[in-house]
Amino acid sequence: MLSRVSEREGALVKFVVITGGVVSGIGKGITTASIGRILRARGLEVTAVKIDPYINVDAGTMNPFQHGEVFVTEDGVETDLDLGHYERFMDVTLSGAHNITTGKIYQRVIEKERRGDYLGETVQVIPHITDEIKSWIREVGKASGADVVLVEIGGTVGDIEGMPFYEAVRQLQLEEGRENVMFVHLTYVPYLEHVHELKTKPTQHSVKELRSLGIQPDAIVCRCERPLDDGVKRKIALHTNVPREAVIDAHDVDLVYKVPLLLERQGFGDYICERLGLDADEPDYSDWLDFVTRIEEADDEIRIAVVGKYVDLPDAYISIREALVHAGAHVGVGVDVAWVDSEALEAGDSEAWEEVKDADGVLVPGGFGKRGVEGKIEAVRYARENDVPFLGICLGFQLAVVEYARSVLGLEDAHSTEFNPDTDHPVVDLLPEQRGVKRKGGTMRLGAEPVVLEGGSLLRRLYDDREIVLERHRHRYEVNPSYVRELEDHGLRFSGHSPDGRMEALELPDHPYFVGTQFHPEFKSRPGDPSPPFVGLIEAAAGQGPD
């Protein structure tokens, strides 16, 4: 086994900076995560940083329709969804420090200015903001002990809010040495159907814009609908001043977990290691290939109806979607997701209800706001009354309690005070420590908390008989303890609780699979380590059962 970078005396941490051009949303996060997987397959320690140039301090108060899912880290920070890609592909656990925003950087600099750290100086973008950015990136590298730090800059080159970050990484290469900092630029190569031709001009202009900022890419990853031919690659190489072997084809694939394998086949891993002088093992993709093969060779397919209010943008539920894929691979079945609008169910839309009735299982995810809540409650009721496997997460867990209180206990007015502050039966209520909290950003119950699982419960078996598990949370409301005994007397079992007695999970013993979790198990699901509540759902939907 060859020595690691970090084991060589005096060696520096290496940095791979990933930038984007032409348009946003073409897959920088997946590309960054795939580079991480490629390096991890070679035995290297890798970590990643996502830079989001928006002024928000974090993603917690942003509408999912604008920004997609809010991914919660183990330490309780609300971050960009790309951190979920990093954790899943690289099999690492990241912290809030791995998501940098303009808001965080300016907050740090202003605090220093107020404290007097810059006394006598005029505080400016250069050097003070750019120095803070570089310092943060280096801190992450040092704290992680990684051989390589991947740094993804959100948005596209030319965005005005991203300028300080591009300048900072330009300086980083100058200070760390070109042999220690590599730039990878992701662009879009459109295919014009009417002329049957891939067009490279947008890529050329994107690289020109990047070079105007003092950054010469070492490699270009080309997103495209169809594979690039050699002539197109040579043209891009010529006009962007990168080696031909560093023009990488990243055409559409039917499964994102195939992307590392696509890049590897083109020699990208060897090129990165050679460019940065990395000593690495021969790549080992055995576990990764086994996972992909399980998905491709699944004989049966089941359908899960995900009933939510942001279903027009599936990225709002990306960790749930991937957790279903992981569980399906584990069980050996394909998983088809039907995205069902809870407002449509609420309105009695027949097509939406057909989606639910045709599904093998129902999942009600988390969310905020009153819109579509009654539709979710109706989906819970349908699954409970018709023995359809059900998983409720966060708000889905709370609404399962509301539905049970209404339908079984006969408390017709039962609700969460989040949606009806005047309900006579507040079976879900605000957490005590949330009373009087006015600020919205970062003030919920967030991050990993211990959950005690009851002996003999279905969840206890799914978690391999572990009594205590750590799962991530993101909520302000909880099951009202005043109603727990009455609910349990009527057959609902609270099979998980926090050490201080909060209700964390529920199940119905006489149902094929009816489980709710206050926590978000999807955030910790990995290809090789699927989330137990999701595995239980898929097993039940496929007609199997836990051992």
Image (cartoon, helix red, strand yellow):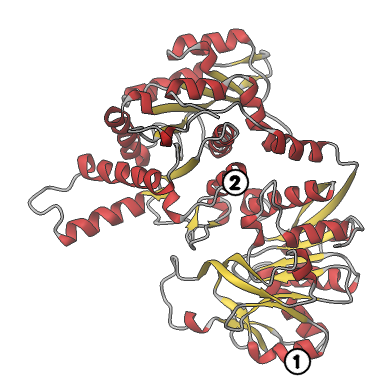
- Residue 224 visible within the image: no
- Residue 504 visible within the image: yes
**Residue under the image location 45 percent in, 44 percent down:** 49
Q: Position of residue 381 (x, y in %)?
A: 82, 73
Q: What residue occupies the far front of the structure in this picture?
A: 1
Quarter of the rendering occupied by the N terminus: top right
Horizontal arrangement in the rendering, residue 220 relative to residue 438 (left or right): right
**Residue under the image location 62 percent in, 56 percent down:** 524
**Residue under the image location 58 percent in, 38 percent down:** 30
Query: SS at mark 1?
Result: helix
Quarter of the rendering occupied by the C terminus: bottom right
Nearer-the-camera pick, 495 or 125? 495
Query: SS at mark 2?
Result: loop
Q: Amino acid at mark 1?
A: Glu
Nearer-the-camera pick, 449 or 156? 449
* Category of crowding for the residue at label 2, using alpha-carbon neighbours closer than 10 angstroms: few (below 14), some (14–19), many (at least 20): many
* Category of crowding for the residue at label 1, using alpha-carbon neighbours closer than 10 angstroms: few (below 14), some (14–19), many (at least 20): few
Relative to 216, say whether 520 is above or below.
Answer: below
Q: Position of residue 414 (x, y in %)?
A: 71, 85
The residue that mark 1 highlights is 486
**Residue under the image location 81 percent in, 40 percent down:** 294
Nearer-the-camera pick, 371 or 362? 362
Camera-nearest label, 1 or 2? 2
Relative to 443, say whether 51 is above or below.
Answer: above
Q: Position of residue 43 (x, y in %)?
A: 56, 35
Q: Dividing the picture into quarters, in which one does residue 452 lie?
A: bottom right
Q: Earlier in the sequence, mark 1 or mark 2?
A: 2
Horizontal arrangement in the rendering, residue 473 relative to residue 170 (left or right): right
Relative to 294, say whether 61 is above or below.
Answer: below
C-alpha separation, residue under disc 1 versus residue under disc 2: 42 Å
The residue that mark 2 highlights is 91
Q: Amino acid at mark 2?
A: Asp
